[in-house]
Amino acid sequence: MSYRKWSVFFLLFVVSVIVFIGGVNYTVDPYDDYNNYFFNEKKIMGVKKIRFIKVLKAYRIKPKSIILGNSRAEIGFNPEHCYMTKPSYNMAISGGSMYENRINFEWALKQKKLQQVVLVVDYDMFTITKQKPVPEFEKYFHYSYIYGYIFSIDTLVDSYKTIIGSTYDFPTWSEYGQLDGGYMQRQLTKMGGHHVVMKYGPSAFYKKASKSYIYPDTGNNSFSDFEKIVQQCYKNNIKLDIVFSPSHIRQWKIMVDYHHINYDHWLQWKKDIVQAVYALSKHYQKPPYSVFDFSVYHPLTAEEVPIDPAKEMKYHWENIHFKNALGSIVLDRLNGTSPHKDFGIKLTINNIDKHLREQSVERSKYIDIPAYN
């Protein structure tokens, strides 16, 4: 065979391999990007690449509204709620830092359609030990990565795993980025019900947390990531709601019992948020964005934990994560349509100190009640 023929043959072979890989990956669609279900309706490999999938989906959908936060927001908030401007997407990510949320926000902003953001803040997003838990996180936002993933060998391997399926119970996500509650229910049942999970769950949740707004691995400031989101919203005339999420009150008891996080530090964090929003509003000469506190002592967050493993809680999965039913109440409150008008309070620079004092008093009413311990 002549060199010319060999070169043509080799080129055709390479092209054929690339076309084959791309064809398989497109058809199997392991990350549920094209809504293809020829082989397996369960896109089980989503759990491996969910951070990238959310970047990819935001690029395809070009959302007008997004939800940001960590797994609490990812599980508890439905982006298809009527409060959200459509198309909408839940860009919250499990274990996400404020840095990751800022980068996700900037990516959504780059799609040039963004009008509304619901930022669900939690203390651990500011005190997480790693600025980016996934080292290659920034690669996901490069167009070469986005367009090249379909021809990737890694994607081909995930396509194979999707085809053969798995007996392992992987979490799945809705088309609009919310983590499926069915997975949470199955895990809860497997582990013995609400009481077992909440009593013997991850009691060391806060033990490795930073004691400041500094990411220990990089030395960068997490609070500045928060402020940059607020700044960009002001600059681009984006509607922003900041929400302290409604975890079960038992979580705040755990936080204090393990003596790593002082309760007063947690309250100060809330005040820091309010003060930062107020300062930025003055800088941009615009009204302060809404800051709502739903991490309060209230019958909805103090839901009794059933000892009977067959009984289900209405609003919570466990200490940390709340159900879509409670997330919907929060969004209804933002929308002004909820009957639970005493749940959550809009915080301002004028009422923050009074609110925090009242919460300290309310805490004493619940802290030693057996049903919540």
Image (cartoon, grey):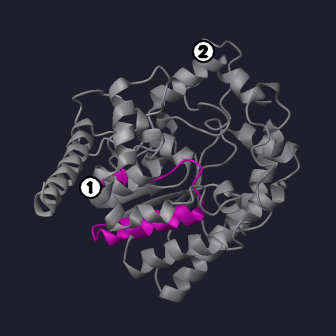
Q: Is residue 236 left or right of residue 98?
A: left
Residue projecting furthest to the front: 1
Any part of residue 276 in sight:
yes
Q: Is residue 353 above or below residue 303?
A: below
Q: Residue at x 49, y 45 (%)?
A: 74
Residue type beneath disc 2 = Lys
Q: For the N terminus, which image quadrant?
A: bottom left
Q: Which residue in the protein does label 1 denote?
A: 61
Q: Could you tell me which quadrant the C terminus lies in?
A: top right
Residue 103, magenta (yes or no): yes
Image coordinates of residue 40 in percent, x first then y, are 30, 27
Would you identify the image quadrant in which residue 157 lies? top left
Nearest the viewer among 281 and 319 is 319
Q: Which residue is mark 2?
A: 311
Camera-nearest residue between 278 and 190: 190
Report whether residue 350 is seen: no
| Boundaries of the magenta span | 87-114
SS for callout 1: helix
The alpha-carbon separation of the residues under discs 1 and 2 comes to 39 Å
Badge 1 or badge 2: first in the primary sequence: 1
Q: Residue at x 85, y 55 (%)?
A: 262
Q: Residues within 10 Å of mark 1 (few under 14, many from 20)?
A: some
Q: Nearer the viewer, residue 138 or 105?
A: 138
Q: Amino acid at mark 1?
A: Ile
